[in-house]
């Protein structure tokens, strides 16, 4: 049992720390209607990692570089004739293909492709936790700094403008925090599943929450539950930890959705 804990405990603690940032950030992603952008940015992390490995640079630099290119590219290709969600879908799949191509053809990381796609928390050890904790604390600090302005923009953008809030600048701030989260979440759930870790807890909480604060708290609880069950489930099922975590979160979402519909249907039938 002690041997198992020495492997599982760092992974579980790392996932729990990461959930502290993913829960409120995921709520903000929903409120700002930026789920597609988060998906594109998450897929871009794979290309960022591939370029960093190819150029022998720290992975964080590659991810930041690609994030900046994605933001600039979206500004340049913005066209009122093209639906924004369709453009983001094209960008996401293009970045994923480029990332896989670069990683498999121009680097010696072919054996690690599954880890980059689906994550592997079990590779983390105790020495990795302090840096992760500091990164999450920095992310939470930045998120707390931009939170009031982001909430106002999500609620009523025209009124926020009147109050002196610059939507373009706040969007860049938010994208920066999101890019940072993608960088630190890559090992946990991989490039393909980052958006799932962000959106699923917040989406589940939205079914039951009665206020923004309640939604954040419920999202945090759901994220922690998903990480805990996901880490242990990955051991039991012998699958990738990121895959297990997001699968658990998806099950929780659909269970909550079905339950909420049953309760609603029972309520209306009782009134009739």
Image (cartoon, rainbow, N blue to C red):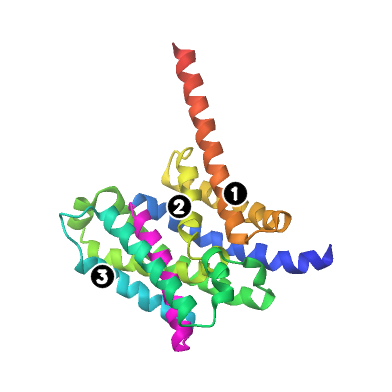
Q: Is residue 151 visible?
A: yes
Kindly state the secondary structure of the residue where label 3 is placed.
helix
Quarter of the picture containing the C terminus is top left
Up the image or down, 137 lies above or below 266; here it is below
Rate crowding at label 2 as few (under 14), some (14 to 19) or many (20 or more) other CA atoms within 10 Å: many
Mark 2 vs mark 3: in front:
3
Q: Position of residue 201 (x, y in %)?
A: 51, 49
Residue for badge 1: 248
Q: Quadrant of residue 42?
A: bottom left
Q: Residue furthest right?
A: 1
Residue occupying image coordinates x 45% and y 13%: 271
Q: Which residues are magenta?
A: 32-57
Q: Residue furthest bottom?
A: 56
Instruction: Give the CA distance from mark 3 to mark 1.
Output: 34 Å
Kindly state the secondary structure of the residue where label 1 is placed.
helix
Instruction: Give the CA distance from mark 2 to mark 3.
Output: 24 Å
Position of residue 263 in the picture relative to residue 230 (left or right) = left
Rate crowding at label 1 as few (under 14), some (14 to 19) or many (20 or more) other CA atoms within 10 Å: many
Residue occupying image coordinates x 70% and y 54%: 237
Main SS type for the magenta part?
A: helix
> Which one is earlier in the sequence, the residue at label 2 or at label 3?
3
> Which one is earlier in the sequence, the residue at label 3 or at label 1?
3
Q: Residue furthest top?
A: 272
> Which one is earlier in the sequence, the residue at label 1 or at label 2?
2
Residue for badge 2: 199
Cβ–Cβ below 8 Å for labels 1 and 2?
no
Instruction: Give the CA distance from mark 1 to mark 2.
Output: 13 Å
Mark 1 vs mark 2: in front:
1
Residue for badge 3: 73
Q: Is residue 100 inside the magenta stretch?
A: no
Q: Quadrant of residue 169?
A: bottom left
């Amino acid at each position: 049992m002690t041997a198992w804990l020495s492997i599982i405990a760092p992974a579980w603690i790392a996932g729990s720390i990461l959930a502290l940032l993913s829960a409120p950030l995921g709520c903000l992603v929903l409120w700002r209607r930026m789920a597609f952008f988060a998906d594109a940015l998450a897929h871009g992390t794979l290309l960022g990692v591939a370029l960093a490995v190819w150029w022998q640079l720290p992975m964080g630099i590659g991810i930041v570089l690609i994030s900046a290119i994605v933001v600039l590219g979206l500004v340049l290709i913005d066209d009122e004739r093209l639906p924004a969600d369709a453009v983001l879908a094209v960008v996401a799949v293009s970045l994923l293909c480029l990332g896989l191509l670069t990683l498999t053809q121009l680097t010696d990381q072919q054996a690690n492709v599954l880890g980059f796609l689906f994550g592997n928390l079990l590779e983390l050890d105790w020495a990795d936790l302090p840096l992760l904790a500091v990164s999450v604390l920095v992310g939470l600090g930045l998120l707390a700094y931009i939170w009031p302005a982001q909430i106002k923009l999500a609620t009523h953008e025209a009124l926020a403008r009147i109050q002196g809030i610059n939507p373009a600048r706040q969007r860049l701030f938010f994208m920066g925090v999101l890019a940072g989260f993608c960088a630190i979440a890559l090992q946990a759930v991989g490039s393909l599943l980052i958006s799932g870790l962000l959106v699923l807890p917040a989406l589940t909480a939205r079914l039951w929450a009665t206020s923004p604060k309640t939604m954040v708290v419920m999202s945090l609880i759901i994220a922690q539950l998903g990480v805990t069950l996901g880490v242990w489930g990955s051991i039991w099922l012998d699958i990738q930890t990121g895959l297990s975590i997001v699968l658990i979160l998806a099950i929780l979402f659909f269970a909550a959705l079905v339950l909420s519909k049953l309760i609603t249907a029972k309520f209306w039938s009782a009134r009739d």
